[in-house]
Image (tube, rainbow, N blue to C red):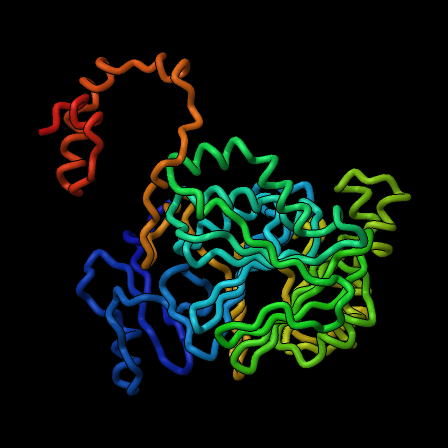
């Protein structure tokens, strides 16, 4: 098969009425006739190595938002049995003022969040719709990952109360910290305890359109959802005259019908059909029909809800988006809704302004590192007791390891002027 360079190719891309010539040839300095023709016709000619238009993809970290713009990134669109191609529920909302809000952080979603290479100091606000693990199962990744990668402050978590105290968000987070006590205590000593703490902002799940957040031009409201038991909620976010609604998990209900009106982007669950849940998800028939349309929202029901709230753009999520499912789900939605629609996939991105809503796919690396922000991580807390006993520490190989890594360490300390204790200086022969 001949390769593209041997063949030579000329491609014309038309974007907003501008002709852009893209050329591959053995003679890289030679302009093809198509671009000469465009130039003669008065079109704008760019370099043969010019970038392609960005209308199809979003490259994280390359596009600054306008002040009156919102970017929504789907970091998880799937089901509780998360798989490599789709994590469970998570949507990142980025506002033009720099604020970033996570709506849910389901199992597997943290890898997608990390791939966006956002400094962890800005990823400190999480709003939970409810406490199923496919909606908060990766909180541990954000908690510990952000702590070790430079988040300087506490994590902030908002979530609903429950019918009883032990069914609420505060109870869940308190016991999350207890379950991760070994992790917390060891990192608190080695790094600093503050970023490992979580402030919980619990609110009444029965509140109708109540304001649960109001800061820096962003207002977030909560209203009840119907799913599995008392406690789940849906959210709306308002910023710069724009409104984003996130449903969480919910059966269609009167609150959503009322409070999702006039929204620019509405994100609502849309489960697979009962037959798909039976065939692909290995559910017995008596569970499949209920999971699809009794305590979740089925595709035709999703369409009906969208027809009732009439958003500028609707987003369906909470299904495995693949060849075996997407077409039937789409067809079922279209039996009751004919408006603008996205079938969500992980890393799908929407840029929302008053003039347009643009859907693209995010393209990011699988090998992202954390990115520094403006804040510096706090030093270890003085006087905090070591959680390792002398009996265990006595097993350290000291002289051999000091000799092995001494040169590397001394060069590093000198380069960054690292303050050292007298004991470390003595062990490594530092003057």
On screen, 355 above or below 184? below
Image mark count: 0
Tell me, yes or no, if residue 84 can be seen here.
Answer: yes
On screen, 426 above or below 205? above
The residue that appears at 33% across and 74% down in the rendered structure is 20
What x and y, as percent, mark residue 200?
60, 54
What x and y, as percent, mark residue 207?
75, 68
What x and y, as percent, mark residue 61?
37, 60
Q: Quadrant of residue 47?
A: bottom left
Tell me, yes or no, if residue 348 can be seen here.
Answer: no
Which residue occupies the foreground of this view, 143 or 273?
Answer: 143
What x and y, as percent, mark residue 154?
48, 52
The residue that appears at 22% across and 25% down in the rendered structure is 423
Which residue occupies the foreground of this view, 429 or 96?
Answer: 429
Q: Quadrant of the N terminus?
A: top left
On screen, 64 above or below 137? below
Which residue occupies the foreground of this view, 176 or 99?
Answer: 176
Instruction: Specify the farthest residue to the left.
Output: 431
The residue that appears at 86% across and 55% down in the rendered structure is 294
Q: Would you say 320 lies left or right of 414 here?
A: right
Instruction: Specify the farthest residue to the front.
Output: 383
The residue that appears at 48% across and 76% down in the rendered structure is 69
Instruction: Specify the farthest residue to the right.
Output: 286
Q: In which quarter of the image is the C terminus?
A: top left
Q: Would you say 219 lies left or right of 420 here?
A: right
């Amino acid at each position: 098969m001949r390769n593209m360079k041997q063949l030579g190719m000329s491609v014309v891309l038309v974007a907003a009425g501008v002709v852009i010539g893209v050329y591959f040839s053995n003679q890289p300095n030679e302009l093809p006739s198509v671009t000469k023709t465009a130039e003669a016709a008065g079109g704008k000619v760019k370099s043969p190595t010019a970038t392609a238009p960005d209308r199809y993809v979003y490259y994280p970290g390359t596009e600054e938002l306008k002040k009156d713009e919102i970017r929504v990134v789907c970091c998880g669109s799937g089901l509780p049995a998360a798989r490599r191609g789709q994590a469970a529920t998570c949507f990142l909302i980025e506002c033009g003022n720099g604020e970033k809000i996570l709506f849910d952080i389901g199992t597997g979603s943290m890898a997608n969040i990390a791939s966006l290479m956002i400094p962890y100091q800005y990823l400190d606000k999480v709003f939970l719709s409810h406490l199923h693990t496919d909606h908060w199962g990766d909180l541990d990744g954000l908690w510990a990952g952000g702590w070790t990668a430079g988040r300087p402050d506490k994590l902030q978590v908002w979530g609903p109360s429950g019918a009883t105290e032990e069914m609420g968000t505060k109870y869940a987070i308190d016991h999350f910290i207890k379950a991760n006590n070994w992790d917390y205590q060891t990192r608190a000593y080695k790094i600093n305890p503050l970023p490992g703490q979580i402030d919980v902002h619990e609110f009444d799940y029965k509140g109708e359109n109540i304001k649960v957040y109001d800061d820096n031009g962003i207002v977030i409201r909560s209203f009840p959802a119907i799913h599995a038991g008392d406690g789940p909620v849906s959210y709306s976010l308002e910023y710069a005259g724009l409104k984003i609604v996130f449903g969480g998990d919910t059966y269609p209900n009167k609150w959503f019908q009322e409070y999702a009106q006039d929204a620019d982007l509405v994100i609502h669950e849309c489960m697979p059909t009962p037959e798909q849940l039976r065939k692909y998800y290995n559910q017995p028939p008596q569970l499949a029909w209920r999971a699809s349309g009794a305590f979740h929202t089925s595709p035709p029901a999703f369409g009906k809800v969208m027809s009732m709230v009439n958003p500028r753009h609707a987003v369906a999520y909470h299904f495995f988006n693949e060849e075996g499912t997407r077409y039937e789900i789409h067809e079922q939605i279209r039996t009751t809704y004919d408006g603008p629609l996205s079938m969500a996939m992980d890393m799908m991105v929407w840029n929302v302004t008053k003039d347009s809503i643009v859907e693209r796919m995010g393209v990011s690396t699988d090998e992202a590192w954390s990115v520094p922000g403006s804040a510096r991580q706090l030093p270890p807390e003085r006087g905090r007791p070591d959680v390792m006993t002398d009996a265990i520490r006595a097993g350290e190989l000291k002289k051999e390891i000091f000799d092995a890594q001494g040169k590397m360490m001394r060069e590093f300390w000198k380069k960054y002027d690292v303050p050292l204790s007298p004991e470390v200086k003595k062990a490594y022969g530092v003057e």
